[in-house]
Image (cartoon, rainbow, N blue to C red):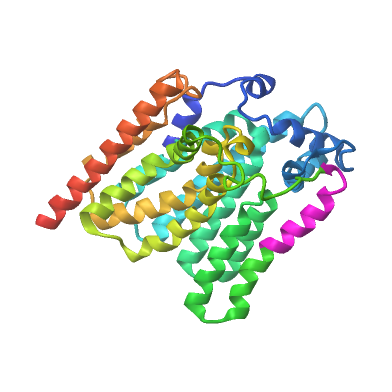
Amino acid sequence: MSAGSFAFVLATTRWWSWEAAIRQGLDTDVRSYQQIARAAPALPPRDLPEQHAERFPIHWLVGVVSSDATLHATYYALTLGVLAAIVLLFQAHVLRSGITTAACAPASVVLIASPYLFRLDALGPGLVVDAVFALGLAGVVAGLAARRDAATLVALGVAAAARQTALPVGLVAAVIILERSRRPARAVAFAVVPLVIYLVQHAVAARFSIPVASRWEITVFAEPGSPQLLAKHVLLVMLPLLPALGLLLGGVVGRGVPSDIVVPVALAAAVVVQPLVLSPGWVNQNEQRLASLSLPALAAAAAVVLQRVDITARTSTMLAALAFVASFHHLTAIGPQTRAVYVTVAVAASAAMAATVARAARSRKLS
């Protein structure tokens, strides 16, 4: 199912050239990332935005292993490889957890068909750091579920090397480890490792970046904007998460909150909090992309909920189809071609998913 979903997503993506994707505003961060890659093995001489410069390791490595002629091809190969690795890791995690195919299928489609994670990264492979972070987060979810601390710490390091978003994820992981092991020293490692990686990257990036004037000024607390702008900001953050939340809500309404979803939901919340607290002006219409980074954790939680509901194969197929419908938007070759229609379809499909799961949960309870 996962391999087929991945192939379907790639087949239905509306492909643009590298420069056309940038002109469409899909991956404008890539202009900074390209400078890092093209300067390798040196560092770029120009002043880049600090938040972009701090994500230099992956792009620097791409530049080291490629030439100007092969740079874009290397990005495509690496991004598609990382996305495929996320699929394999998610599949291995849910199977190891004893989750049935019926429960796994809709959750995997919610992850793989995400417009702002898989589709966007495949279309704009210069955003490979997003995919690498998502791979690291998937590894953290799997490692904590299997109680493999060393593997979890490695996955956390991978996520931290890709994006600063790993800092709050590390704090949540530290709390989880402390609650489980009651060993403060072990828990501290999960908070310290991403922090050390960030500080090292920040120090290196300071040589070729323009620092942010004040981190407080870029938050929603300092610059909330108008009520209408703030409401739009929250909507854009939540929009790509609606299918996963639909599965979760339907299962929780029907059967209550299972304890097994607390960890992945907490990890997802640590990711979503970043775009929520940043000001709308600073995020600049990137709320959906940043919030979608939480989907490896949310999809894992959704699989647990569906397993508890014990849905039938027919219901599983219906939910997977609805998840695909919710993924169609202007990045797809079929489906809605305007944002308004996409939002309407995504909300309707997600609501239908919630209702379907809740109905299945109630029928199982009665039987």
Left of 61 or right of it: where is 150? left
In the rendering, at what x and y percent does residue 344 appear?
35, 27
Residue found 62% across the figure and 55% down from its top: 166
In the rendering, at what x and y percent does residue 69 appear?
80, 26
In the rendering, at what x and y percent does residue 62 appear?
76, 40
Seen from this angle, which residue lies furthest bottom?
182
Q: Is residue 236 above or below residue 367?
A: above
**Is residue 202 located in the magenta-colored stretch of the structure?**
yes
In the rendering, at what x and y percent does residue 328 appear?
42, 27
Left of 156 or right of it: where is 39? right
Residue found 45% across the figure and 65% down from its top: 145
> Which SS does the magenta portion mostly show?
helix
Q: Is residue 93 above or below residue 129?
A: below
Q: Is residue 263 visible?
A: yes
> Which residues, given as a range, are shown in magenta?
194-209
Give the quarter of the image for residue 124: top right
Which image quarter is the N terminus in? top left
Left of 79 or right of it: where is 252? left
Q: Total of numbered circles in the picture? A: 0
**Is residue 303 located in the magenta-colored stretch of the structure?**
no
Q: Is residue 148 visible?
A: no
Give the quarter of the image for residue 260: bottom left
Residue found 13% across the figure and 50% down from its top: 363
Which image quarter is the C terminus in? bottom left
